[in-house]
Amino acid sequence: MLDAVGEVFPEAKYQRCVVHFYRNVLSVVPKSKVKNVALMLKAIHAQENKEAARRKSADVIEELRTMKLQGAVKKLRMAWKKR
């Protein structure tokens, strides 16, 4: 789908839906930790600019590693690689 958007709208930037991003990350998080991880993700999006969001994301990734949530770490890192 992303390739098709690039072909049809070559000047357009792709922005992933925040809801689908959250769902994607939370799909690999145990139910007992979903609320905590969701708050962490919201904290990233609450930052004032992209650089602050990157710093917060790095903090969240480190916390997810501490919580042994490697699947969530992988999805969050992949999301930033696309930006």
Image (tube, rainbow, N blue to C red):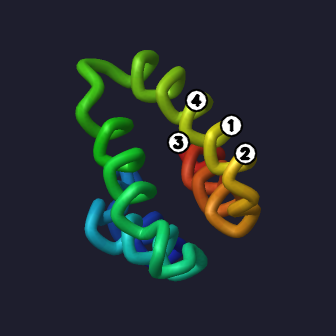
**Tag 4 secondary structure:** helix
Residue 62 image label = 1
Q: Earlier in the sequence, mark 3 or mark 2?
A: 2
Image point (40%, 56%), residue name: 36
Please tell me how crowded label 3 is: few (under 14), some (14-19), or many (20+) other residues with Cα within 10 Å: few
**Tag 1 secondary structure:** helix
Q: CA distance from mark 4 to mark 2?
A: 11 Å
Residue 4, image x, y percentages: 46, 78
**Residue flagged by tag 2: what amino acid is it?**
Thr
Q: Nearer the viewer, mark 3 or mark 2?
A: 2
**Residue flagged by tag 1: what amino acid is it?**
Glu
**Residue annotated with mark 4:** 59
Residue 83 image label = 3
**Residue annotated with mark 2:** 66
Q: CA distance from mark 1 to mark 2?
A: 6 Å
**Residue flagged by tag 3: what amino acid is it?**
Arg
Q: Are discs 1 and 2 less than 8 Å apart at CB? A: yes
**Tag 2 secondary structure:** helix
Q: Are discs 4 and 2 less than 8 Å apart at CB? A: no
Q: CA distance from mark 4 to mark 1?
A: 5 Å
In the rendered structure, the answer to whether residue 24 lies left or right of residue 79 reads left
**Residue flagged by tag 4: what amino acid is it?**
Asp
In the rendered structure, the answer to whether residue 74 lies left or right of residue 45 reads right
| Whether residue 6 is situated above or below residue 30 in the rendered picture | above
Asked if one can make out residue 1 in the rendered structure from this viewpoint, the answer is no
Q: Earlier in the sequence, mark 4 or mark 3?
A: 4
Q: Are discs 4 and 3 less than 8 Å apart at CB? A: no
